[in-house]
Image (cartoon, coloured by chain):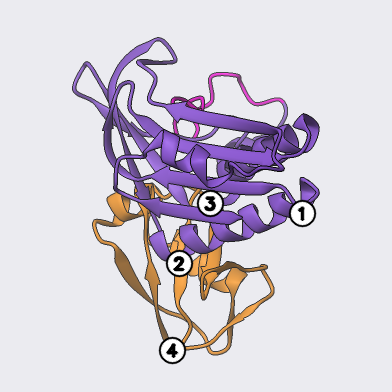
Chain colours: A purple, B orange
Amino acid sequence: MMYSHVGPEPVDVSAVIDLVRAPGNGGIATFIGTVRDRADGSAVVGLEYTAYVEMARRELRKIVFEAAGIGSDADVAAVHRIGQLVVGEVSVVIAAGHAHRAPAFGACRYIIEEIKRRVPIWKMEHYASGDSEWVVPSGVITEAVAAAPTDAPTDAPTATPVTATTGGG
Amino acid sequence: MDITVRLFASYADVLGSSHATLTVSDPVTVAGLRAALSAMSPRLAPRPLIAVNEEYADDDQFISSGDEVAVIPPVSGG
């Protein structure tokens, strides 16, 4: 079983897990991402996920296919929600079922890591202060930073504010 | 030639639209398109990925007038 979806509908966690239940699957690994109430010390009231929907669906479908192979023919299902979410709501659910736990964990982990690396979905954080900001994932070096000479003062301005990856796993 | 690109997230905000049309040399590569894009505003996040027909494209890939082209700033799903 391979299933993937990107859409605005609230995610039914149990339904996603049920997709990978099978008599031969002695282990099911799951990852559930939810909206966290803080980011870098700022109170967060909600997130807005926007996507290049057609490509996001295509990319997630590829990731799920790859994960099924990595997991030695694991059954895998992954759903990512988009739109406006409030604190505590589920943004992503991944379930991987296999006869044994190691391939199930491996497939589940692979899917969430690859989602964060390459599925064209972006989140904007809405803060309690009323401000909002697009999240720039941690580890992303902007060209302005990368091009700065090594002896540049540490307070040199950069083109883009960098915030840590937050919320939703 | 004119290439219309789809914009998302910070790019759509900075340029105030979900699309932008760039006039570029023909033929043009992904790297050439990116250079034309960055000239549009100093406030655009540098070096976004470019997708052609819903697939990530390499810098030296050529873009044809009928291709669906999208600008992909660093993703933050999950």
As measured in the structure, the alpha-carbon distance from the residue carrying label 3 to the one carrying label 4 is 30 Å
Say few, some or many: other residues with alpha carbon within 10 Å of mark 2 (under 14 / 14 to 19 / 20 or more).
many
Q: Which of the chains bears the disc numbered 2?
A: B
Front residue of this view, candidates B2 and B8: B8
Residue B10: image tag: none
Span colored in magenta: A151-169
Q: Is residue B53 above or below residue A11?
A: below
Q: Amino acid at mark 1?
A: Gly
Q: Which of the chains bears the disc numbered 1?
A: A
The tag earlier along the polypeptide, 3 or 1, is: 1
Q: Residue at x 52, y 64 (%)?
A: A58
Q: Is residue B26 visible?
A: yes
Which mark is nearer the camera, 3 or 2?
Answer: 3
Query: For mark 4, what is the residue?
Result: B1
Query: For mark 3, what is the residue?
Result: A119
Q: Residue furthest top?
A: A41
Q: Residue at x 53, y 51 (%)?
A: A119
Which mark is nearer the camera, 3 or 1?
Answer: 1
Query: For mark 1, what is the residue?
Result: A69
